[in-house]
Amino acid sequence: MDENEYIRRFTELVELEREEQMRLHEEEMRRLSGREREEKGRAFLRMKGKSQGLGLGGKHLVRFRKQNSATTLPESEIEVGDLVLVSKTSPWDEDNPMGTVAEKTSYSITVAFDDAPPGFVFRKDLRIDLFVNDITFQRMLEALKKFKRIPRWRKDKLLGHAAPDFERIGEIEFLNEKLNASQREAVLRSLAARDFFLIHGPPGTGKTITCVEIIAQLVKHGRERSNKILAAADSNVAVDNLVERLDKIGVHVVRIGHPARVIPSLRRRSLDYLVQAEPDYIKAQKLRQKAYEIKERMKGVVIPEMRWRRGLSDETIMQLASEGKTTRGIPRKKIDGMRKWLDLKHGIDKLFADARELEDRAVKRIIQEAEVICATNSTVGSEILKGAKFDFAVIDEATQSTEPSTLIPVLKTKRFIMAGDHKQLPPTILNEDAARGNLSKSLFERLLAMHGDKIRVMLDVQYRMNEEIAEFPNKEFYDGKLKADESVKKHNLLDLLPESKFVSEDAKPFLFIDTCGSEGFEERTRRGSTSKENVGEAKLVKEIVERLLGLGVKPEDIAIISPYDDQVALIRRELRVEGLEIKTVDGFQGREKEVVIVSFVRSNKSRDIGFLRDLRRLNVSITRAKRKLVLIGDSLTLESEGCYKRLIALAKERGGYKRTCGT
C-alpha cells in the first residue's frame, strides 16, 4: 500500500479500537454492580483513604485499605501502574479523581494523584475502579501523522517497497561470554543492520539477554560518537527487565515513566528520582515553595472578580492604582486591593515559569547524559521526550504491540532492532473490525512476511523447559529447531522434593488429564457474562494444588492459568493461598513457573472450542512450565481442532495421559 492508504487505514483502526475499549469499559461499569466488578477483579469496595503526603514527582499519595483494616484485599486485576477512578457511590460523578496505582500490598493500595484529590477520598465507603487510559491511543495517532513526514527512502523500506541495507562489521568481543551461537549471530547481524533487524525468540530462549548484549555493544562502540540509544517495550514489566539487566552490567540507564509504574528496586534509575539531585531542580523546588507561600498571602487580598473589576482590564486597574484614581463607582480601596492581588499573581506566575524552566533544564541534562533511555512505547511519545532523537532503538516484546504502538519508538530513531515471537499471542484487540483489519498484526510480523530470513535470526536454544514439556510446541510451532539446554533438559519436579513423598505420576514432567466430557465437567456461562467457567475442572485444579503443596512445593513455584476470566475468578474463590498465582493465559505471557496447571474449560456437545482455536494461545499455555506441566481438558471437545488432537496423542505416547472417567 502507499503511505496515504497506510496512514488512513491504521488511523481508522486505532480509532475503532479506542472507541471499543471505552464503550466496553463504560458498559461494564454501568451494567455490573460494584460487587460484581470487585468479584471480577476490576474494583475495590468499602475502602477508606489516608494521605501519605507528596511522593516522587510531586504526586499526591493516598493509601486506601478496607474499612476493616485487618481485611486483606480480594484478588484483583488492578496492579501497580494502572489508572483507577475513586468515587463515593457512582463512578460517573464529575468530581471523581483519577490516579495511578503506586504501590499494592495484601492489605492496601497507594494511589498517586497529579493534583490534590477532593476531600471525600479521605472518608469511608469508597469505591476504586480500574479505568481506561486514553493517552496511548493519542500517541499512536500522533505517530501515524509523523510517519508522513519521514524521508521517502525510509517509508519505502518500512512499507516493503525497498530492501533494507546491511554493513560489514568485524569481529567483536562479546561482553556476555555465555551467549550461545544463535544469540551471537543475532547480535552480530543486528549490529550490521543499517535499517532494522528482527530477533525471533521462542519461549525461554533468552531474547531479552540478547537485547541487553546488543545495547551494551552499541554503548561500548558508540561512546566516542555520543550515540543515543533507546530501549523500549510495550509493557512496564518488560522495560523494567531491561533496566535491571543493563544496570547490573554498569550501563548508565535512565528509566522514563510515571514513578508509580517503576518497580521500587529500580526507582533510583528513574528520571523522577535522579532529577532530585540536580542543582537546577533543587532551585526550582525552592521557587515553587516561595510561590506557594505568596499564594497563601493572597487569601486576604481583593480578588479582581467581575463585581469589582466591572470590565476593567488588568492594565487599566494597575494604571488607576498607580495614579491614585477610581472609575465606574469602584472604591479606591478595592482598586488598590486588586492591584496588590495582580502584583502577587504576576510574581507567582514568574516564579512558576522560572521553576519550570529550571526543571526542564535539569531533565534535559539527565536525558542528554544517559547512555540508554528506557521507556514503554507509549511513554516514548510523551512530552518529556518530545525533542529527543536517537541513533538506535532496541524494542523488546515487539510482537505484543500493535504496529501504531511500535511506530512511536521506531520513528524516534535511525535504526531499530525488534525482538519477539509471532508464534505467541499478538496484541489484544477488542474491536472485531479492527482485528479483521490487521491491527492485531505487529510490525515485526509484517516486516518478517515481506523480507523473510534476510532480516531475522531465530534463537534456537531454550533454557526453561524439560525436554518432554518442550517437545510438542517445538514440533508444532518451531519446525523442530528448538533445542533444550543441558541445564534444563532433564530437570523435573522431583529435584525440588524429598524422595520419600512422591509417586510415579509426580515424576512426569508433562501430564494431560482428560475429563472425557463426563458429568460434572461441563462448561457453563454465568448470567450476564460472555466468559466461560467449568466447576469440575476448578475442583480438580484445587485437588492437584493441595497435593503439590502437601508434597512440599512452594506456592510461589506454582501458577494456574486458564483462557477464561470467569474460570480464573472461580479458581481464585476455590483457592486462597498466599503466593499462588492464578491468571489468564494472556496475563501470564512472558512469565514462567516451576509448575503450571492449565484449565482449558471448554466441554460441550457441539465440540465448540471458541477462541482456543487461536493456537498461539495454546502455545503460550504450554510453554510457561519449567519442571511440570499439567493440562486439564475434555478431549471430546478439544480434539475438534487437529493441533489439540496431536497434543493429546503425544501425551498418550509419552505415558503422560490420565482420565477422570475410568479406563
Image (spheres, rainbow, N blue to C red):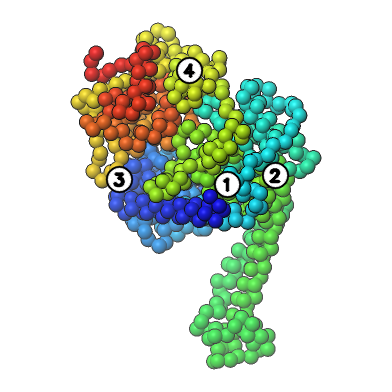
Label of residue 196 in the image = none
**Does dot 2 land on a helix, a strand or a loop?**
strand
Residue marked by disc 2: 391
Q: Earlier in the sequence, mark 2 or mark 4?
A: 2
How far is mark 3 from mark 2, CA to CA? 49 Å
Residue marked by disc 3: 36
Residue marked by disc 4: 466
Q: Earlier in the sequence, mark 4 or mark 3?
A: 3
**Does dot 3 land on a helix, a strand or a loop?**
helix
Label of residue 159 in the image = 1
Q: Is residue 290 above or below residue 240?
A: below
Q: Nearer the viewer, residue 436 or 367?
A: 436
The amino acid at mark 1 is: Leu
The amino acid at mark 2 is: Asp
Q: Is residue 235 above or below residue 652?
A: below
How far is mark 2 from mark 1, CA to CA? 21 Å
Q: Earlier in the sequence, mark 1 or mark 3?
A: 3
Q: Earlier in the sequence, mark 4 or mark 1?
A: 1
Q: Earlier in the sequence, mark 3 or mark 2?
A: 3
Residue at x 60%, y 63% (from the top left corner): 292
**Does dot 4 land on a helix, a strand or a loop?**
loop
